[in-house]
Amino acid sequence: MGTPLSAALGIDREGLVGRFLSVNEFHGSNANFVIASLMVDSLKRSHGICLISLHNTFGHYHHVLTKMSALNLCELKEQNAQVETVELISELREHMYCEDECPHDLWDKHNKISVQQLFSIIRDKVRKLLVTHPTVCVIIDDASHFLDMGVSLRDVLSLLQYCRTLLTTFSGVSLVVLTHVITEDDSNLLANNVAHVADTIVNISVLKTGHSSDVTGVMEVKDKQNNDASSEKWNVSNLFHFKVMDRQVKLYAPGTSMLRT
Amino acid sequence: MLSSFTSRKTHSSLIIIEDNADQPSSYLFQTFIHNASLQHLKVHVICFENPVEKWTRILNSNVNIHDCFSDHRGWNNVNEENDLQGVYQEKGLLGVVQELLNHGDGKPSVVCIDSLTPVLFRHGLNKCYRDLHALLSIARKDEEKLNQLVAVIHEDAVPERWDTLEQMRHLATTVFQIQLASSPNSSGWGLLHVTHRKAGGKIVKQVEEYRIEKDYSVLSREKKNQQLEASEDVDPTVAVQNLTTFKLTLNPQEEEARSQLVLPYTRQGRPKGQSGGGKVFYEPDAADDWDDEDPDDDLDV
């Protein structure tokens, strides 16, 4: 069971349960396929998903998952109650055009997102999912947009720290955070802070030497989960080339993409 | 030097370990905690960055692990059993450590902070610096109360990076900057820079290679500039010949024959009348139309 990506991340047997996975999308690349693959993997294992989307609408994920795996995300959300979403793009649009009090009090008196209230919403959705599903995956796509919305780096880090507490408060919860990284920016600080505490780090970047029709980009996976003296996997880094196609993603060892086509 | 600090033969009131995401310091930090716990000291680990569960399964049971991670901003409003987080929200790092020292049992305390980075983001550099300075003063005045502070700082994840790191390095009595991390399962030696401020004011700087064993013992040695030393004189021709099955060397007869070989189109010695310098020697073939006349003679210039 599992996508090729889940095998590369080492989660093909047990899934993401109890782990914190950080996805760093370096400027110029697109790591959305990682989120989509993880969603497919979780849904096929009957895990619940709590999706906090800041970069794409829910419809985007629905279309992508339909192409990749024939999963109907709308049906899973409305009928099976397997998916809960917090669409901050829609919330922002409603807030901008809302003249009276908005239904969600996500905004504070300074018209900025209240991360405390957002965490409260996430926690409630996780609790709701855990009633029907023993394992839940919380996905934040993408955390750097909090900075674009005017949330301070300190508050974003506090939000992520509280989201990490869900892994210990509830059994069976995992966390995936995607960060878009631009060097010499607060997003770089955000990614570095997350990298220090994540169990697994996935770095997605473009080829340094240019474009290729055979390879879309480079994926580096670093597993830090086993942090005790007997582990052989501590801080080990694996490098892959990947090619994103319409309905699938292929992974290769560096230099072998031509051999497999 | 590192091994003398981890074994506590050399005392340092405030030790700061600088690492980055690629070269984490977790094993070195665990080593300090483990070795302190083996001595007659009360060891406190304050968790600002990681949950308590991470440390409880790794460390000895006699290490006191304190939670300042799970509710550092008071959002959960559930802190009846854990007043320490409430103290942290109001008074910062200094308040937390003073609270621990006030409930001591007479043993000297060693306080280990899993990361200063969340503290810097939460309370700012000024407050964090003042708190550390106050704690350092306590440690210097009364070692029986606060024997040592060990703190980790992520050099790639702190706000106002250069100011923060310079201030922390200035404050600490010992700074370990990790260049290459070592773990019990890594095959090679790690590398770090040590800066130690002695009691008399003298500053010692050293680059060291270090290795942490599975029992948390530390091997360290000063890194020399000359990495390789010739262990014995080895005949280079023999060494090269051993690398391949092809015959790469020449016997004496072949060497003499090669030295006597005259290569074509090279001139042996100089013609008479020529003193040297750059000359072009042209020997025309039978088919060449050689004309000694200057082709520009007919120009009226």
Image (tube, helix red, strand yellow):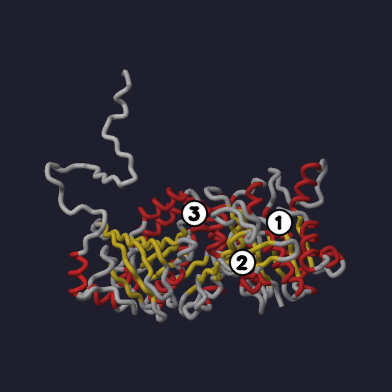
Q: Which mark is residue A257?
A: 2
Q: Are marks 2 and 1 on the same chain?
A: yes
Circle 2 or circle 3, nearest the eye? 2
Q: Quadrant of the C terminus of chain B?
A: top left
Image position of A100 (left or right of B275): right
| Vertical relation: B240 (above or below) B226 | below
Looking at the picture, does residue B225 appear above or below residue B286? Answer: below
Residue A7: which quarter of the image?
A: bottom right
- State left or right for residue A252 relative to residue B219: right
Could you tell me how far apart the alpha carbons at marks 3 and 1 are, in whole angstroms?
A: 25 Å
| In the displayed structure image, the side of residue A109 where residue B245 appears, left or right | left
Q: The disc labelled 1 sits on which kind of residue?
A: Leu
Name the image quarter holding the N terminus of chain B: bottom left
Q: Secondary structure at mark 3?
A: loop
Three-letter residue code for mark 3: Val
- The residues bearing labels 2 and 3 have C-alpha atoms spaced at a distance of 39 Å
Closer to us: A39 or B205: A39
SS category of the residue bearing label 1: helix
Which of B153/B281 is in front? B281
